[in-house]
Amino acid sequence: MPLNTVQAIDNAKHNTDLSHVASRPLDEPTATSDEANLELLQAELQQALQHEIKAHTVALHRESEGLVISLREFGFFDSGSATLRPSAMPALDRIASILAVRTCHLRIEGHTDDVPIHTAQMASNWELSTARSTELVRLLIVRHRFSPERLSAAGYAQYHPIVPNDTPQNRAQNRRVDLVILSERITRRTVPSETANNKPSPAIP
């Protein structure tokens, strides 16, 4: 068999063996870079919120989806109210200034304890948790010019406690609004791409 034919067969076999390997797009973050970005962001937020963290009105922790900034009710809201206290605005402004220059997506979660609420303004814990998360989304859009595409709001009422609701201190921890800073891998999985958003709808016969 001629040498050039043998070489062509070998090259074809080699290319076939590698055909299942997909190269990573150059602009796609690796798991390592994603983790490093979250660590840097956490360090920056800890520095900016050190007073609130020391006063236990803010807590930072990591979850599988990303980084969570937990705003305790007693530092940010009056009991039963979805309006942020004026004294809480400086802390929110610092958080927003750090997040505004990034592209990460945020899920704003409202949580309560298990004591039922029924007031003229709020009929249940569902309404209160949802109203607080929506109010925070509104402030990020109106006050800090966040793109609405980066934000989502959710209300979980008393059904996602971080500690048992067995003492006043624990119930105070459960009354909170969490800003979940989603990691890039979660964002890529849950947010449609621009191409997908612009894809034409199929014609209806």
Image: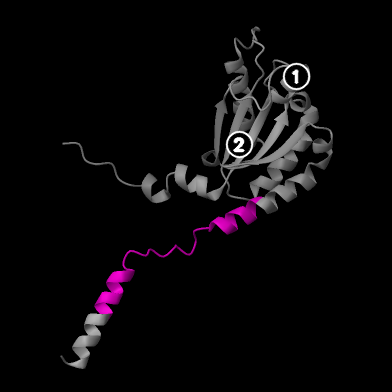
- Compute the Cα span from label 2 to label 1: 22 Å
Q: Which residue corresponds to the image point at 67% horizontal and 18% vertical from the top-left?
A: 113
Q: Which residue corresponds to the image point at 21% horizontal and 90% vertical from the top-left?
A: 4
Query: Residue under circle 2?
Result: 141
Q: Nearer the viewer, mark 2 or mark 1?
A: 1
Q: Which circle's residue, 2 or 1, is located before the other in the chain?
A: 1
Q: Which residue corresponds to the image point at 72% horizontal and 16% vertical from the top-left?
A: 166
**Rendered image quadrant of residue 45:** top right
Q: Image height check: is 116 above or below 141? A: above
Q: Nearer the viewer, residue 192 or 84?
A: 192
Q: Position of residue 65 (x, y in %)?
A: 56, 42
Magenta range is 11-38
Q: Which residue corresponds to the image point at 60% horizontal and 9% vertical from the top-left?
A: 123
**Rendered image quadrant of residue 69:** top right
**Rendered image quadrant of residue 137:** top right
Q: Image height check: is 197 above or below 82? A: below
Judged from this view, the residue extending furthest toward the front is 1
- Tell me the amino acid under the disc marked 1: Asp
Mark linked to residue 78 = 1
Q: Position of residue 180 (x, y in %)?
A: 61, 38
Q: Position of residue 104 (x, y in %)?
A: 58, 47
- Tell me the amino acid under the disc marked 2: Ile
Judged from this view, the residue extending furthest toward the bottom is 2
Give neighbour class at mark 1: few <14, some 14-19, many 20+ (Cα, 10 Å): few
Say whether residue 47 is magenta. no
Say whether residue 29 is magenta. yes
Give the structural element (helix, strand or loop) at label 1. Answer: loop
